[in-house]
Image (cartoon, rainbow, N blue to C red):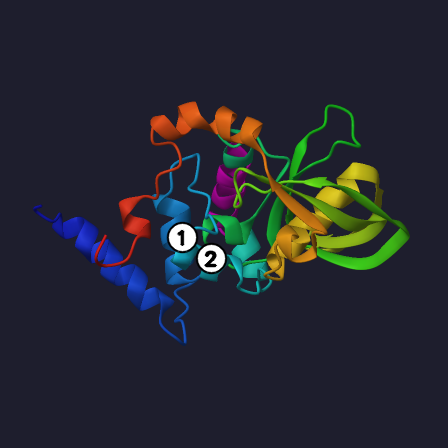
């Protein structure tokens, strides 16, 4: 098959950006800028069955700087994360940056505890304190499709993040299922998957059936520019 020179160039740039140590090129790193600008409005979500994706999902994320939060790339990243988690083919209640190939402490979370149940993007997100009793509930993950697990979590948490407008640290106490979502997504930011904590994991054929029509349309295919040599 004839190779597209532009694709080859992008792959080489991505590989160079992934080398250690990474070079900073203004706000965000080279690879992060590539992911943000090259991705469609619905971004590719990494899955554990892909070796390179699995390595990204296990990475530990770092904070966004004030310069990065004030850059034009941050609102673009936030908007694409929101479009992705709310898309029909994903239909999630949360999405963390490592799931779209960016190792930063940012997550989009559906606030089921607020009027209208909006999705909100939280940069530099952390858990400051666990509250209440341990509860066990069913969880799934966009990066582990077709599976569900029984996971113990704290009933409540105190979370903190950076307000992208004021750049001030905000803290909030959250309870119920929304607190579970926060814990699940913050685990992603520390390279932890729900299967690491689950007491039981099982196949979910209904979820697979829901995804099948989208999979047939190529909705979950990894973009060529996200792949390495040999694909």
Residue of label 2: 54
Q: Residue furthest right?
A: 132
Q: Quadrant of residue 136?
A: top right
Residue at x-position 52% and y-position 54% = 98
Q: Nearer the viewer, residue 69 or 40?
A: 40
Disc 1, disc 2: CB below 8 Å?
yes
Secondary structure mainly formed by the magenta segment: helix
Distance from the alpha carbon under mark 1 to that under mark 2: 6 Å
Please tell me how crowded label 1 is: few (under 14), some (14-19), or many (20+) other residues with Cα within 10 Å: few
Segment colored magenta: 71-83
Residue 214 falls left or right of residue 182: left
Q: Please, what secondary structure does the residue beneath circle 2 have?
A: helix
Give the percent coordinates (x, y) of residue 119.
65, 34
Reading the image, the residue beneath label 1 is 50
74 falls in the magenta region = yes
Residue 198 x, y percent position in the rendering: 69, 52
Give the residue drawn at x 75%, y 31%: 112
**Residue positioned 34% across, 65% down in the render:** 17
Q: Position of residue 132 (x, y in %)?
A: 92, 50
Does the rendering let one see residue 27? no
Is residue 80 in the magenta section? yes
User: Crowding near pointer 2: few (<14 within 10 Å), some, many (20+)?
Assistant: some
Residue placed most toward the observer, 52 or 27: 52
As drawn, 124 above or below 151: below
Instruction: Choose top left, top right, bottom left or bottom right for residue 197.
Output: bottom right
Viewer-nearest residue: 18 or 123: 18
Where in the figure is residue 82, as x and y percent of width and height?
55, 36
């Amino acid at each position: 098959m004839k190779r597209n020179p532009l694709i080859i160039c992008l792959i080489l740039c991505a590989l160079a950006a992934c080398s250690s140590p990474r070079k900073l090129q203004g706000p965000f790193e080279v690879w992060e800028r590539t992911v943000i600008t090259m991705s469609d409005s619905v971004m590719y979500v990494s899955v554990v069955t892909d070796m390179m994706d699995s390595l990204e999902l296990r990475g530990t994320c770092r904070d966004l700087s004030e310069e990065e939060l004030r850059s034009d790339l941050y609102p673009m990243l936030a908007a694409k994360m929101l479009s992705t988690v709310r898309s029909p083919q994903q239909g999630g209640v949360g999405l963390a940056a490592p799931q779209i190939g960016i190792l930063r402490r940012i997550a989009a979370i559906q606030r089921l505890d607020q009027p209208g149940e909006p999705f909100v993007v939280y940069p530099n997100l952390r858990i400051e304190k666990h509250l209440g009793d341990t509860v066990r509930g069913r969880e799934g993950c966009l990066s582990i499709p077709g599976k569900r697990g029984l996971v113990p979590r704290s009933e409540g948490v105190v979370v903190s993040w950076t307000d992208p407008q004021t750049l001030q640290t905000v803290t909030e106490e959250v309870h119920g299922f929304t607190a579970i979502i926060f814990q699940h997504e913050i685990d992603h930011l520390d390279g932890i998957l729900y299967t690491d904590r689950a007491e039981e994991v099982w196949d979910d054929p209904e979820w697979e059936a829901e995804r099948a029509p989208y999979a047939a349309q190529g909705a979950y295919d990894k973009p060529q520019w996200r792949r390495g040599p040999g694909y």
